[in-house]
Image (cartoon, rainbow, N blue to C red):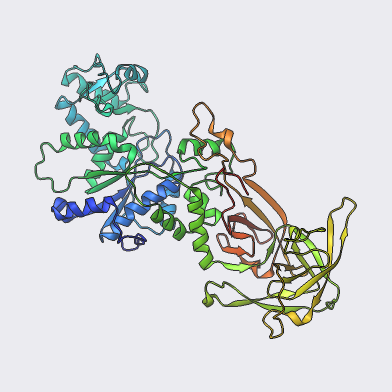
Amino acid sequence: MNNDAPKPESAEVKNFIYQEIDKDLAEGKNGGKILTRFPPEPNGYLHIGHAKSICLNFGIAKHYNAACNLRFDDTNPSKEETEYVQSIQEDIKWLGFNWKDEPKYASDYFDQLYEWAVKLIKKGKAYVCELTAEEIAAQKGTPTTPGQDSPYRNRSVEENLDLFERMRKGEFKDGEKILRAKIDMAASNMQMRDPIMYRIMHKPHHRTGTKWCIYPMYDFTHGQSDFIEGITHSICTLEFEVHRPLYNWFLDQILEDEPDVKVRPRQIEFARLNLNYTVMSKRKLLELVQKGIVSGWDDPRMPTVSGLRRRGYTPESIRMFADRVGIARRDNVIDLALLEYCVREDLNKRAKRVNAVLDPVKLVITNYPEDQEEMLETINNPEDESMGSRTIPFSRELYIERNDFMEEPPKKFFRLGPGREVRLKSAYIIKCESFKKDAEGNITEIVCTYDPETRSGMPQSDRKVKGTLHWVSAKHAIDAEVRLYDRLFMDEEPDGHKGVDFKEFLNPDSLKTLTDCKLEPSLAGVKPLDSFQFQRIGYFSVDKDSTAEKIVFNKTVGLKDNWNKKGKNK
């Protein structure tokens, strides 16, 4: 049983899939058994849309105290790699789910699928065809006009068996022959117009090597694999709705002579996840990787699970997102801001607040003793008192953010300026007395005094000022690199413009790298994927590129949504 899988956040509010499963159970179908599966093709890394499907399939199993299989749909060796198999397993486990037994593969069933294909040929329900893909498309017709029969459709059973066996032995070139189901070229559902069952591919398979040079198509593989495993409910995205009659037709043919079958899979479709400001096509994501537009499948700007993980998203936030999106019957587009909201909500409760100055300028407190240092107490997270507090060093010379000072501040600028006072977070109130500039007019140093009676937490510190700034002691600061990530695309629907390459909408400011950032010393021992809230800036996560010599942080998300409805930074 899949007892380790987190329960859906709103399992008590049942969507239509749960209602259909309840109905099947009430009718006694499949002997009251429930078994789901997650069947990815190992031709790329999983993305956030797959995460929604994972949460659904494994969540159903958990809800019904059942199990969920992981099965790789590995029927296309030209696109599949062991790297993808490994990454998919890692992503599922990271999301908090475990599958039943060992991972399964469609390639485990190649021998059985071949036998069933032979069975269909013997029944006169499949034939070897020699038309090209272009010729098949030309003869298939339209939704309102019937297709034309292949000139090879009425070959004898004996000839089809001979040709299919020779296909298996490798006597023909790629594309020279295919095996098609013999159904109805006038069917209103185009999927039923003699679909392809097998094609020739002289390519080694990542698991079966060179044993096979013919490979089954998805539609012939999927339902039969479900049947072999005893899957009761095959949950698919909506684009497979038109494939369901074919799914059932293949099952009808192979089960026709097996009246005692106790478990027959049922396909149910739901709307796939569509996010604005991103692309979800694995082909297009692969293009971004191969052309070096991103650093890899786990680039923090990618919608992949590994990219989100590297950026600092938590499994809890992704499961929360999947739950809030819900399960719909029809396609819709979800605002990326909802995903960002979920990670913000999760990290707000668990992330320690720390001081980090990303664009530092030096601040000198002239009336603070030169050799004096203090350790000031500050709370780790006001949302969770159990996280306690820590101490941070304070000294005469500090760093603050450059944009927290203005030479001629407007009236409603509640930060630092000549003659103005602000509070340093968990420290003292300071007043700007003067500042220094270089030959180009850049501020190089801010000169201040402090009020020693205003130390935070002391009884006499009740004097109020409007602004509070974060800071880092210059003497104790740790150097760091910080990568500021933004949305990869500037258009809400980058792949939705006919005739326009989706890459035309890439955001040129999707990554900015800051190399002179200053961190408080408590961050010296951080590890990859550790997450923090940088005070007043946002949530950040330690990148895998970090070393003992150089800490690298990725921006996960800001403290609030900074995008307006036109998709531009405010």
Residue 555 lies in what quarter of the image?
A: bottom right
Q: In which quadrant of the rendered image does the N terminus lie?
A: bottom left
Which residue in the rendered view is the most extreme toward the front?
A: 411
- In this rendering, would 435 be left or right of 150? right
Image coordinates of residue 533 in percent, x first then y, are 60, 64
Q: Residue furthest bottom?
A: 459
Q: Is residue 566 visible?
A: yes
> Image quadrant of residue 288?
top right
Q: Nearer the viewer, residue 52 or 11?
A: 11
The quadrant holding residue 226 is top left
* Closest to the observer, 504 or 137: 504
User: Between residues 227 and 204, which one lies in front from this camera angle?
Assistant: 227
Asked if 532 appears above or below 80 in the picture, the reply is below
Side of 374 relative to 257 (left or right): right
- 220 lies above or below 355: above
> Residue 128, how many percent across, how many down?
25, 21
Image height of 266 relative to 210, above or below: below
- Residue at 22% from the left image edge and 34% from the top image edge: 245
The residue depicted at 42 percent of the width and 49 percent of the height is 88
- The picture places residue 494, in percent across and down from the top left corner, at 52, 36
Which residue is painted at 31% across and 41% down in the image? 106
Q: Is residue 100 visible to us here?
A: no
- In the image, taking residue 353 as reference, residue 476 lies left or right, namely right
Along the line of sight, which residue is nearer the eye, 26 or 565? Answer: 565
Q: Residue placed farthest to the right in the image?
A: 439
Image location of residue 537, percent across then percent down: 64, 60
Residue occupying the far top of the picture: 151
